[in-house]
Image (cartoon, grey):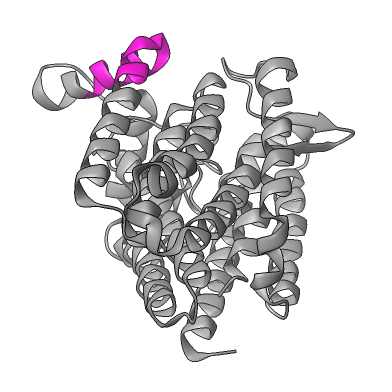
Amino acid sequence: MKPYSFIIFVTAVLLVIFGSLLVLSASSTFAQLKFDNPQALFAAHIGKAIGGVILMGILAMVDYHHYKKYSKIVLIGAIVLLVVTVFFAPEVKGSQRSFTIGSVSFQPVELVKIALFIHLAAMLERVGDDISDLRLGVINPMIWVLIVVILVLLQPNVSNGVLILATGIAMLFVAGIRLQHFFAFAGGGFVMALAYALYKPHSFKRISSHLGAIFGDGDFHPQVMQSLYGLGSGGVLGVGLGHSAQRNLFLPEAYGDFIFAVAGEEAGMIGTVGVLLAYGAILVCGLIIAKNAKDKFGKLLAFAIAFSIPLYGFVNAAVAIGVVPVTGLPLPLISHGGTAIIIVCSSIEFY
């Protein structure tokens, strides 16, 4: 394993370990009340976390070029699963993001993201010197991006759709499309996403109330307020692992989307800065790997992964500190959950 790949691997494992400790702490009160077992959610999480790390190690021995020939069929299959979820999955908390088979819950958006990145990298490599051509270099790849984004928005999952769109357009930019094409599609994508977010009542309410809290006399979302209390009470060194007050249902589902606040309360500023630096290490090392990749497929795929993981991490942290509205995005490799941690671990093997 090459040095930068090794750094990313070790960093990912450390994030998974730290995240598992936080999940154990943050989920204990809720699990005790719901399942009469304080370790119930942790037990489900740790099995998937270990499985993800093992899968990351196994897949690291596989040449990522093998996935190129199957990229289209895998993406189509993932899109079909996404369609099934959007139109047939039961609604949970106002959205349809997962379906359950037996006792296993699966979110297709996690699979479709990595499948999309692989297929885009393969498409853009085939385009070659015709990358400046509007149809070949931009429109054809963007059709796949928009299919995925529209389906994700229909769940509705506005934040995930926006970040997938941002990553897709960033891949086109790195591939070498013309600047006027980049600015046109980036601007158009931003306007489309903003218009849809303002159209949907739940996202419009979040955006308007958040802006009111920043620029007016309104209050932040209750979860954001509790998150800020947790981060503030942690100080520099934190109150210690397992001693969070926010986990006692002050912060609902603290083991999920707002686990960054628990990290700040229990591990202090050192813990939160450490997490952000870890994502920064993945970004920098990933970009170096992308720059030194021997072919365009490797460059683009490495870039997409290096760009998307920290992007999701920084957005999650921005929500926790009240910089952006509540999004419902997990903290990569840390938050409780099965699909996300397994897929993210699997994507790291492409390094």
Magenta residues, start to end: 195-210
* The stretch drawn in magenta includes residue 147: no
Above or below — where is 250 with respect to 56?
above
Q: Quadrant of residue 164?
A: top left
Give the side of residue 195 with respect to residue 89, left or right. Answer: left
Please state the horizontal and vertical placement of residue 244, each as a whole percent of the image. Answer: 47, 49
Q: Residue at x 46, y 31 (%)?
A: 250
Above or below — where is 259 with respect to 223?
below
Q: Characterize the magenta stretch by its predominant secondary structure.
A: helix
Q: Residue at x 53, y 90 (%)?
A: 2
Above or below — where is 69 with respect to 185?
below
Please state the horizontal and vertical placement of residue 81, each as a whole percent of the image. Answer: 73, 33
Q: Is residue 337 visible?
A: no
- Asked whether 312 or 193 is in front, the reply is 193
Please state the horizontal and vertical placement of residue 161, each as a whole percent of the image. Answer: 46, 33
Give the side of residue 184 with respect to residue 145, left or right. Answer: left
